[in-house]
Image: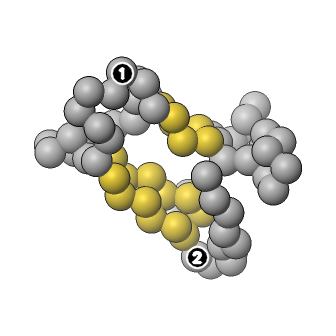
Amino acid sequence: SGWWRIAEDEAAVIDFQPPPECPYWMFVLSNYWGESFDYRHHPIHTNARLATRGPDGSVRLVVAHRDPG
């Protein structure tokens, strides 16, 4: 886990290769105290089942204030 601050005109791009023998992994956004953001109105998580993988099995996550397209 970790924390960072992203300005409204910035985005964090996270590229990673999930472990091949891993049946489950998850990425979730929360505040400093581990409290959930508003998941009813915004996508705040993904996991091994939901994420779209690239041809090599990699995953790219983009965290931003607004959808960068």
> Residue visible at 58% across and 76% down?
10
Res. 66 visible in picture = no
Q: Is residue 44 left or right of residue 60?
A: right
Q: CA distance from mark 1 to mark 2?
A: 32 Å
For marks 1 and 2 on the same chain, the one whose residue lies earlier in the sequence? 2
Q: Residue at x 36, y 21 (%)?
A: 23
Q: Residue at x 61, y 52 (%)?
A: 1
The amino acid on which the numbered mark 1 sits, given as a three-letter code, is: Pro
Q: Is residue 55 left or right of residue 66?
A: left
Q: Cβ–Cβ below 8 Å for labels 1 and 2?
A: no
User: Which is closer to the viewer, label 1 or label 2?
Assistant: 1
Query: Which quadrant would residue 35 be assigned to in this image?
Result: top right
Task: Pinpoint residue 42: horizontal percent, then vertical percent.
Answer: 69, 42
Q: Which mark is residue 12?
A: none
Q: Amino acid at mark 2?
A: Glu
Give the mark count.
2
Query: For the point 28% across and 47% down, which residue is it?
Result: 17
Nearer the observer, 62 or 30? 30
Circle 1 Cα neighbour tier, 10 Å, few/some/many (<14 / 14–19 / ≥20):
few
Q: Secondary structure at mark 1?
A: loop
Crowding at dot 2, Cα within 10 Å, few <14 / some 14-19 / many 20+, comes out as few
- Mark 2: secondary structure: loop
Q: Which residue is mark 2?
A: 10
Q: Is residue 64 visible?
A: yes
The residue singled out by tag 1 in the image is: 23
Residue 67 appears at what percent x and percent y? 56, 57
Image position, residue 66 (x, y; %):
63, 61
Residue 22 in percent (x, y) is at 33, 27
**Taking 56 as reference, is 51 left or right?**
right
Quarter occupied by residue 14 = bottom left
